[in-house]
Image: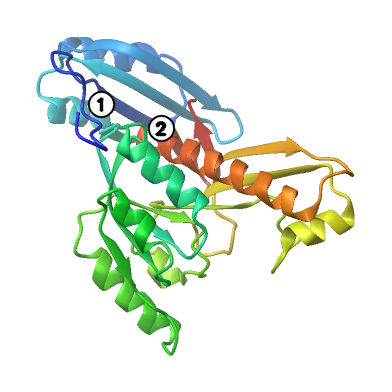
């Protein structure tokens, strides 16, 4: 495989992913698997969950050998209790752009995974409001676009950013420590398609130097949160989180390094879950079939 190639091994038939979200009622699994069987599908894996509070049913099914996939989805849409969402996903075949600023750790992790076919998506471009990470990006043969923000209004900068992004056919945007707040109008162009990473001290230690603040407060764990971006700052549905323990002997720079390590792993994990079609959004929560 070429760097970043997420296609299946030669000779293996790629599976497709059926994603269903609908009101719960008895017999749904029997109904859905029966429709799959009638279309000649062979189920490879299956996961389901019922949110008892919302009374909604979620199901993720990988299958092979189905004929007329579009008619399969249409039959399920017509048969399931409304309002139902039926989608045939394309796991591992997404196209993304990565937005970054000056910190290299998250971008570097994504570029390495992409180069070795472990990301679950193809990085089409890296876009930054600083030129700092251009040499890192170009080592991997990935296009780098410098879109400076100084001297521009936020709206003008976002228009310039969108001008670059529109050159690519993109499924998702990954914010790899992109230190700019995106407006609601920009986010609306990519609904549930922008994924961010930040340290998990928010809202306790907001602003600059969070690890210095954490050191002074004597925290005992540090971590990171990856989430979908919504109009509310850092309020979108959470995809993945992780923490590492620290103690009184850790200096602020050591805390910051541990924070960077957990951030890059959590972001990569969250993106892989999304790219593998394992994440459903339910209100401001997520259902994750890990």
| Residue 193 position (above or below residue 25) | below
Q: At which x and y percent is residue 274?
A: 41, 38
11 with respect to 60 (left or right): left
Q: Which residue is mark 2?
A: 22
Instruction: Farthest residue to the left: give it.
Output: 68
**Whole-percent x, y for residue 181 in the image:** 52, 70
Which residue is most to the bottom?
151
Tell me which corner region of the image, top left, top right, bottom left or bottom right, holds residue 154: bottom left
Query: Image quadrant for the N terminus?
Result: top left
Q: Judge whether residue 277 can be spotted in this image.
A: yes
Q: Earlier in the sequence, mark 1 or mark 2?
A: 2
10 Å crowding of disc 1: few (<14), some (14-19), many (20+) = some
Q: Position of residue 234 (x, y in %)?
A: 59, 58
Q: Which residue is mark 1?
A: 76
Which is nearer the eye, 205 or 62? 205
What residue appears at the point 35 percent right and 74 percent down from the top-left corner?
147
């Amino acid at each position: 495989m070429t760097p970043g190639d997420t296609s299946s091994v030669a000779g293996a038939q790629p599976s497709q992913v059926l994603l269903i979200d609908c009101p719960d009622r008895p017999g749904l699994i029997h109904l859905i698997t029966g429709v799959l069987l009638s279309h000649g599908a062979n189920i490879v894996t299956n996961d389901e969950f019922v949110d008892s509070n919302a009374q909604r049913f979620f199901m993720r099914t990988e299958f092979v050998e189905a004929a007329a996939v579009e008619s399969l989805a249409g039959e399920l849409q017509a048969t399931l209790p409304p309002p139902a969402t039926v989608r045939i996903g394309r796991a591992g075949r997404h196209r993304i752009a990565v937005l970054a600023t000056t910190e290299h750790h998250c971008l570097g992790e994504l570029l390495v995974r992409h180069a070795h076919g472990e990301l679950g998506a193809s990085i089409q471009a890296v876009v930054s409001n600083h030129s700092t990470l251009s040499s890192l990006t170009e080592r991997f043969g990935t296009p780098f676009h410098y879109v400076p923000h100084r001297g521009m209004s936020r709206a003008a900068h976002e228009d310039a950013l969108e001008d670059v992004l529109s050159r690519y056919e993109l499924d998702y945007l990954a914010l790899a420590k992109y230190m700019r707040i995106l407006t609601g109008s920009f986010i609306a162009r990519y609904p549930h398609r922008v994924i961010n990473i930040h340290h998990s001290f928010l809202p306790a230690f907001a602003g600059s130097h969070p690890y210095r603040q954490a050191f002074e407060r004597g925290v005992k764990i540090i971590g990171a949160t990856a989430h979908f971006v919504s109009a509310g700052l850092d309020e979108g549905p959470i995809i993945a989180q992780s923490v590492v323990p620290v103690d009184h002997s850790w200096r602020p720079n050591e805390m910051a390094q541990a924070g960077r390590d957990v951030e890059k792993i959590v972001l990569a994990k969250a993106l892989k879950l999304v790219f593998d079609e394992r994440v459903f959004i339910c209100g401001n929560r997520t259902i994750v079939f890990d």
